[in-house]
Amino acid sequence: MKDFLNKIHTIDQAILDKYISYWTEYTAPKKTIMTAPGETERYMYFVLDGVQKSYYLNEDKQHVIAFTYPPSFSGIPESFLTQTPSKYFLETITESSFLRLPFKKHQQLMQEHRELETLFRKATELFLIGIVERHYELMAFDINQRFTSFAQRSPHLFNLVAHKDLASYLRIDSTNFSKLFNAIKI
C-alpha cells in the first residue's frame, strides 16, 4: 500500500506510516455484496487480493461500472466521500482481502495532515481522469475500438472476470463480445 500511495504523491514517510497504521484487514468471500443501493459506504478499501465489481441493476439486468483488483482502492467513492446512500452495488467476484479505513478516521487524519489531503486530492484527480477517459470511450468508440482499447489496457481481466461482466462493462452485446474475443489476439 505504501508504494502505491507514494506513486500518487510522496509525503513524509512518518505521516504515511501513521496513516497506514489505522487501516485494518478485512476479508470477504466470493459473491459478497459489500455495499448495496441505499447503504452508505463507511469504509475506503485497498485491495490486497481478489477482484470486485460495481454495478447498477436496471430491470434485473446488471450494468457493470468498474472492476477493482490489487493494487487499487475499492468501494463506492461518491457514497464514501459524501456519506450519502449508494445508488449501486459493490460485490466481490472472487474471495477478496482488503485493508480498510473508516470514513471518520480518514477525515480526521486528512485534517491533521495537509500532506494526506494533497495525496487524496491527487488520487481523486487520477480517478476523475479515468472516469472521463472511460466516458469518452463509451461515447465515441465503436464496439471494436472499445474492445481493443480494453484488451490493450487490461488483458489480465479476460482470465479473471466472467465475459458477460466484461461485455456489460464495455456495453457490448454478449454475442458480439464473444465474436470479438475469438477474432482478436490478446
Image: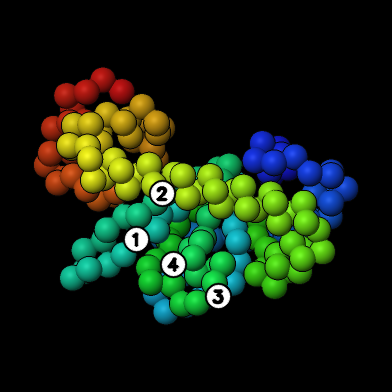
Circle nearer the viewer, 3 or 1: 3
Q: Quadrant of the N terminus?
A: top right
Circle 2 is placed at which residue position? 131
151 relative position to 30: left or right = left
Do the CB atoms of the residues marked 2 and 1 lie less than 8 Å apart? no
Q: Amino acid at mark 3?
A: Gln
Mark sitting earlier along the chain (3/1): 1
Q: Which residue is denoted by mark 3 in the rendering?
A: 83
Crowding at label 2, few (<14), some or many (≥20) Cα neighbours within 10 Å?
A: some
Q: Quadrant of the C terminus?
A: top left
Furthest residue toward right:
14
Relative to residue 155, is residue 141 drawn left or right? Answer: left
- Give how far across and how far down residue 6 sits, in percent: 71, 39
Q: How many marks?
A: 4
Q: State which mark lies toward you, 4 or 1.
A: 1
Disc 2, disc 4: CB below 8 Å?
Answer: no
Describe residue 62's horizontal placement relative to residue 36 as left or right. Answer: left
Could you tell me the amino acid type at mark 4? Ile
- Categorize mark 4 by other alpha carbons within 10 Å: few (<14), some (14-19), many (20+): some
**Going from the N terminus, do you reach mark 3 or mark 4 first?**
4
Precedes in sequence: disc 4 or disc 1: 4
In the rendered image, residue 113, in percent from the top left (x then y), is placed at 81, 58
Q: Amino acid at mark 2?
A: Ile
Q: Nearer the viewer, residue 37 or 134?
A: 134
Q: Which mark is residue 55?
A: 1
User: Is 79 above or below relative to 150?
Assistant: below
Alpha-carbon span between mark 4 and mark 1: 11 Å
How many angstroms separate mark 3 from mark 4 (CA)? 18 Å
User: Do the numbered discs 4 and 1 sit on residues whose CB atoms are within 8 Å?
Assistant: no
Residue found 53% across the figure and 45% down from its top: 126
